[in-house]
Amino acid sequence: MSKVAIEGNSSGTGTFTIASPNSNTNHTLDLPDASGVIDRLNRAGNVLQVVQGSTSTAVTNSTNVAADTGLSASITPSSASNKILVLVTHSGCNKSSGGTQSGVTINLVRGATTILTNAGYAVSYTGTNLQLITNISFAYLDSPSTTSSTTYKTQFKNNSNTASVTVQIDSNNTSTITLLEIAA
């Protein structure tokens, strides 16, 4: 049977206490079979939580006014100083035939505030009347400075207002938004 040894530091004067929570359940803490330091959950740079949203519902916009894509996710940061890493993949971005200058433009929105404009600018642009279906992915590191539930979503528009544009053009195209809380 292996042994567990707790060794104090002869240079230190503080007292470290190992305390258990108020629980009626037995728990086991498995230590790694390696030397090193056990990481703190809230150490700067650690991922504290992950939330994901997705949609495969087609949405069309025939204007150059931003409209919701149907893609969103909400996260509640544990500290106002933490950051949120937003990862977006929009699938099935389409410019319909007609409108040579048309393309899909995607914005990232926190709450009601656009925080990243033209994350994808003129996606599916061909410079011709040809239809083009494509995907776009982007990342953004945000500092929401809150501990309240925060919703991130994407909006899209036609960059030139000369033809309709669509995201998630059919049910085979699923768009995702992933939110990672990063400890400050």
Image (cartoon, helix red, strand yellow):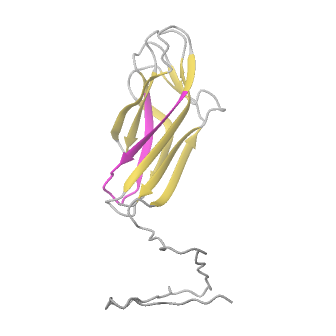
Task: Residue at 65% x, 32% y: name it.
Answer: 171
Picture quarter with the C terminus: bottom left
Residue 137 in magenta?
A: yes
Q: Position of residue 73 (x, y in %)?
A: 48, 48
Picture quarter with the N terminus: bottom right
Q: Quadrant of residue 17?
A: bottom left
Q: Is residue 5 left or right of residue 11?
A: right
The chief SS type of the magenta part is strand
Task: Residue at 51% x, 53% y: name it.
Answer: 51
Q: Quadrant of residue 81?
A: bottom left
From this view, report whether residue 16 is shown above or below residue 75: below
Residue 19 in magenta?
A: no
Q: Position of residue 69 (x, y in %)?
A: 49, 34
Q: Is residue 82 left or right of residue 49?
A: left
Magenta-drawn segment: 135-156
Count of numbered badges drawn on the protein: 0
Q: Is residue 44 left or right of residue 1?
A: left
Q: Nearer the viewer, residue 64 or 2?
A: 2
From this view, report whether residue 21 is shown above or below residue 149: below
